[in-house]
Image: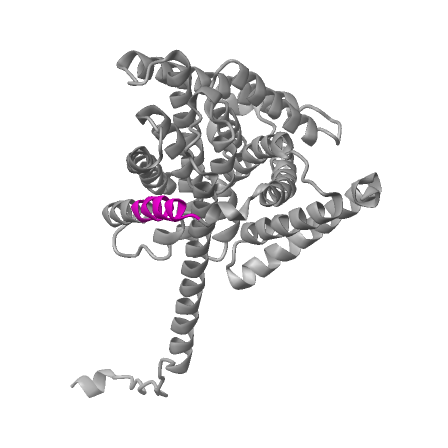
Amino acid sequence: MDAILSSYGLIIAASVIIILSFFFGELSSKTNIPSVLMLIVLGIILAYVLESQVGRKPDFLPILKILGTVGLIMIVLEAALELKLKREKYVPIAIAFIIALVGLLLSTWVAAIILDEFVPNMDRASAWLYATPLSILSSAIIIPSVSGLVEYKKEFHIYESTFSDILGIMLFYFLTGQIDTGDHHGGGSSLLGYGGNVLLTIVISVIASYLIILIFQNIKSHTKLFLLIAVLLLLYAVGKQMHLSSLIIILVFGLMISNMQLFFSGKLAKWLRVDKAKEIYDGLHVVTMETAFVVRTFFFVIFGMTIILSSLASWEVAKISVLIILSIYLIRYVLLRLFIGKDILPQLFIAPRGLITVLLFYNIPVQAEVPGFEPGILLFIIIATSLIMTFAMIYDKQRSEKSVRKVLSDPVGFQKWKAPTIVEVTEEDKH
């Protein structure tokens, strides 16, 4: 027991977890099984090992909240650094935004009706609050999983999942604000006030992002990237303390530095040192990707360690979860057919729940907690949507490989062709 909890024991465990996570990622790229599921299973196994050796499981909830928050920031920043605001991208971005927004609202509304109907002691306000995390796409699972798709489908999922994260968190904290103030009807004044809050956050985000880029491009030290991340974390935390939509700060900064020449155009162009700013972007891209990988790894392993598998062995949990899952894919089918058309595979089934769902669930205010809500519903939906995505990705990969094999087995024929001889016509031949 002492060996397991010693400093060297913890270092060994952390190192092995990161190594396994790397191999899980490689395995995921070959099999399309999300590495997140493997990490959760690893956490479940580690929990049993720890409990058998130590006799109890430590309280991981505070660590889970911190890792979830940092992971959320890194994942949104990583996604924003990938988004290029080019003219030809405006329509796909707008479509992804509309699908993410409408899908979030409709899924939350239907899930709230289901929870209000079947969960004891659940009122309408709490139902909406509990339904919101269950309606948010997980960019932490989607972004690493769609790398093998064709470019336009991959971009759609990056845009949609990022927007879903941000909009879902904004909706969640809007609803918690209604519960804190006792306004459960979401009146016009509340919506107007929240809209003003978002607008203020955007203005602060743009000003702060310009200042950060201008200052950091002139810092000569080689150790400025984690300083930059520390500044972003500070802005996020201070923004939360001021009840701002802090995730917008991270998104706006990522968009501005990845599209710097768009935001520093005209008279502002003379203030941008493109070579230095490009160095910051390239370094930040690597650091963010690596940090997101580590944080995501430990988050899902620790989440697996907190899981109580017996919570899944309930008819009520299965019934409620299946109804919510069916509503998710039905709403998604209608939206994708309306805005994308017939080519909606595998996009239809890429709708996993994950990091944001867990993080927001643990941030539900005490006064809004409902004793009758089974945490197994959360776990059931996360696992089921991830497995559905896995099967869809495997099917899509097999379908693509089958198409390629068919083309290769029936190649386009060819025929030798000899160019005709050109005979020169003289004046005498004409006469």
Magenta segment, principal secondary structure?
A: helix
The answer to whether residue 297 of the structure is visible from this angle is yes
Pick out the residue farthest to the left: 431
The answer to whether residue 217 of the structure is visible from this angle is no
Give the colour scheme shown.
one colour
- Relative placement, left or right, of 1 versus 345 is right
- Relative placement, left or right, of 346 versus 283 is left
Q: In this view, does 173 lie above or below 421?
A: above
* Residue at the image point whose x is 53% and y is 63% from the top: 31
Q: Quadrant of residue 159?
A: top left
Front residue of this view, candidates 53 and 204: 53
- Image coordinates of residue 209 in percent, x first then y, are 54, 23
Q: Does the magenta stretch include residue 321?
A: yes
- Image coordinates of residue 314 in percent, x first then y, are 42, 48
* Residue at the image point whose x is 40% and y is 59% from the top: 392
Quadrant of the image for the N terminus?
top right
* Residue at the image point whose x is 83% and y is 42% from the top: 2
Q: Is residue 376 above or below residue 213?
A: below
Q: In which quarter of the image is residue 55?
A: top right
Q: In which quarter of the image is residue 405?
A: bottom left
Q: Count every numbered label the image shows and give the total.
A: 0
- Image coordinates of residue 354 in percent, x first then y, are 49, 42
Q: Magenta region: which residues?
A: 314-327
* Residue at the image point whose x is 47% and y is 50% from the top: 383
Q: Is residue 221 above or below residue 35?
A: above
Quadrant of the image for the C terminus?
bottom left
Q: Does the magenta stretch include residue 82?
A: no
Front residue of this view, candidates 57 and 238: 57
- Image coordinates of residue 260 in percent, x first then y, are 52, 31
